[in-house]
Amino acid sequence: MRWRKWLVAGIAATALVGTSAIAQAEDAETADPSKAPCTDDAMIVFDASGSMSGNQELGIPNSKPRIDEVRWALAQVLPSATRYRRVGLVTYGPGPYNQCNVSLALKPTANAAKKIMRAVNRIIPAGKTPLTSGVEQAAEALDYRNNPGVIVVVTDGEETCGRAPCELAKRLHDNAARLTIHVIGFRYSGYSWTGQNSVMDLMCLANENNGLYIKANNEEELADALEKTLDCPMISQAPLSMGAVR
């Protein structure tokens, strides 16, 4: 009957691991908010420059514009992410023709998913790519000198308004209370205007501010990247080992 003892032991071990995982998740939910990374205020910096209106796969009829792919990915992630943190939105691109337009659409706000989606769904892509100014305005909206915060940049192109992203990255790092900048390069490698220097600029924004630089080549990868950078990193499940069961 030894196998029965092994089976009982295996079930007990599995239950213990599951209970531990649930306890960790509950602890994370009830922890001091000042120590929980998923509760820091966040800003999305949304590239709505003219290039975002283009078809992502040239020559294929009825392919979606890149901005529609970003909208889809945001719609998948925001309902969960905004449960745990206040989120705001900066957009750049739309406005006077061929200008470096940046707009603070929403300061960090609780339960902001619907408000953000309404804002991005109204956007008509246009203009240049003042990426640096967009990040700077997002940092100011977070009051980054006094409060911890997270910035998630979604862009398909390089800075085209004459500023230096890496210089800003270093200045923000030197003056921030605790700022994390993640950069998602969306369908970034397939276009002639995105050279090695521009990639280095985006990586610098992230590296100088304890963030991730992630390349996403389709809307599913973009949703995954947004989940990784914006959503709450809860410990909700642990692998359940059945190694004791024979």
Image (spheres, grey):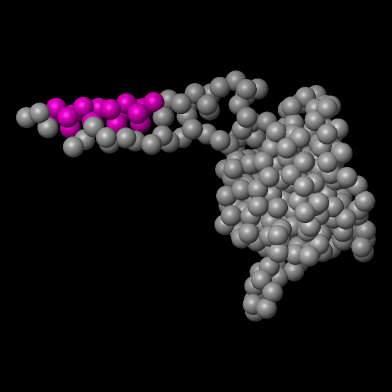
Residue closer to the observer: 148 or 95: 148
Question: Along the horizontal axis of the image, is 163 left or right of 114?
Answer: right
Residue shown at 70% from the left, 53% from the top: 185
User: Is residue 8 magenta-colored?
Assistant: yes
Along the line of sight, the residue nearer the viewer: 187 or 83: 187
Q: Quadrant of residue 213?
A: top right
- Name the outermost residue toward the top: 32
Q: Position of residue 132 (x, y in %)?
A: 85, 45
User: Is residue 104 among the parts visible in the rendering?
Assistant: no
Looking at the rendering, the stretch of residues picked out in magenta corresponds to 4-20
Image mark count: 0
Q: Which image quarter holds the C terminus?
A: top left
| Front one among 18 and 10 | 10
Question: Is residue 224 shown to the viewer in this render?
Answer: yes
Name the image quarter holding the N terminus. Answer: top left
Which of the 4 image quarters holds residue 209? top right
Compared with 90, 144 (above or below) is above
**Considering depth in this image, is 69 or 81 the residue closer to the camera?**
69
Q: Which residue is situated farthest in the front direction here?
A: 196
Question: Image check: 141 left or right of 185?
Answer: right
- Residue 107 location in percent, x, y? 78, 39
At 35% from the left and 31% from the top, the residue drawn is: 18
Q: Residue at x 78, y 65 (%)?
A: 192
Percent coordinates x, y for residue 34 in the rendering? 65, 22
Residue 149: x %, y % from top left:
73, 32
Is the residue 116 above or below the residue 170 in the image?
A: below
Residue 232 covered by magenta stretch: no
Magenta part, dominant SS: helix
Residue, far left:
1
Residue lying at 76% horizontally and 51% vertically, measured from the top left: 199
